[in-house]
Image (spheres, rainbow, N blue to C red):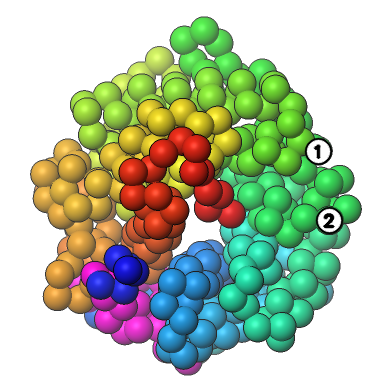
Amino acid sequence: MNRIKEKFDVTHILRMTDDTGMFQHARFTIPDLDKGYTTDDNARALIMAVMLHENLAKADYLSLIYRYLGFVLYAQNKNGGFRNFMTYSRQFIEEEGSEDCFGRCIWALGYTLASPAMPAGIKGACAAAVKSAMRRIPTITSLRGQANTIIGLDLIGGNKANHFIPVLAQSILKQFEQHASKEWCWFEDKLTYDNAVLPWALFVAYRHLGQEKLLGTAQESLKFLDQITFRNGYFQAIGCKGWMLQGEKPAKYDEQPIEACSSALAHLVAYDVAGDREMLELARLSFAWYSGKNSCGKSLIDGETGGCCDGITSDGINQNQGAESIVGYCMANFSIERFKAVDSSLCLEKKVSIR
């Protein structure tokens, strides 16, 4: 029985999507046309739509894949990079987006390519975009850009992946060696956003390369992050209003939904790679943040719209329901359910990759 089919509501996803792509922001439950779109959001929405199609195989979801992929392809420059911010009038406002955006596009293209449920035409378009993007990879220097690129390359495979994954992984390791100490096991001198993607990428690189140093650093850094984000017995993201500087306390607010998603997926990969059941429990606890096991004690999921609120602020739940929030919730939900689908008891002998 498909548990996702029984309970999943796509009303807000469809409402947030027009014939261009997914809108970036919402005013409460209403798409905020003034803020336009981002490639960042549409790339991750592509992953979400592929997951939807893999689970439910409805024509509506295949249509979403074409929509979001079309956006990503249109965003790609001749040099292989990707523009990010687009106005409601379909005009990109920059020549090239961030390296984070690039990495997430590689992840999305790789995820789509790796799905056995995708038609040949979709896979062909993804492969062409990946081929064009390869020339940009040597220029990526930001940690999160490198991490997301590793995750995507692992899905893509082939000679280029075999070449670039070691290079990118060594660059991330170098940053860890430069900044880490006995008390501070991290890649930078602060904890900011999408933190879990860094150890996640090293777990993926270890699975690809088999180098023990990658596994050790992935486990050490994720354990350090866990000691902070699960310090109160539930998941509590580093607040974006101040972050956490080395030697200081983490900012309480605002907690953003994408952090719970990143944490859930990172722990699922850690479990898949090393078989540590504690990682599976922390993945579940990360996902439980959405349903109310959080610092506010309230669910962020809107039962009427199927949307996800935009985080936890000092005033309570942020009632806006933007793209990043619903996409992050969906990806975490589908990934958790994939593990449950393999074995309801989640035995260590029956592990499965979330790709």
Q: Which residue is mark 2?
A: 158
- Horizontal relation, residue 133 to residue 19: left or right: right
- Residue at 34 percent of width and 69 percent of height: 2
- At which x and y percent is residue 8? 28, 71
At label 2, the amino acid type is Gly
Mark yes or no: residue 88 visible. no
* Other-residue count near label 1 (Cα within 10 Å), few / some / many at <14 / 14–19 / ≥20: some
* Other-residue count near label 2 (Cα within 10 Å), few / some / many at <14 / 14–19 / ≥20: few
- At which x and y percent is residue 220? 53, 20
What is the spatial separation of the Cα atoms under label 2 and label 1, in whole angstroms? Answer: 15 Å
In the displayed structure, 7 sits above or below 206; it is: below
In the displayed structure, 222 sits above or below 96; it is: above
Res 135 quadrant in image: bottom right
- At which x and y percent is residue 41? 48, 67
Q: Which residue is mark 1?
A: 167
Q: Magenta stretch mostly in which secondary structure?
A: loop
At label 1, the amino acid type is Val
Does the CB distance between marks 2 and 1 fall below 8 Å?
Answer: no
Nearer to us in this view, 48 or 280: 280
What secondary structure is marked by label 2? helix
- Residue at 15 percent of width and 54 percent of height: 299
Nearer to us in this view, 33 or 102: 102
- Residue at 62 percent of width and 78 percent of height: 118
In the displayed structure, 99 sits above or below 83; it is: above
The residue range painted magenta reads 7-29
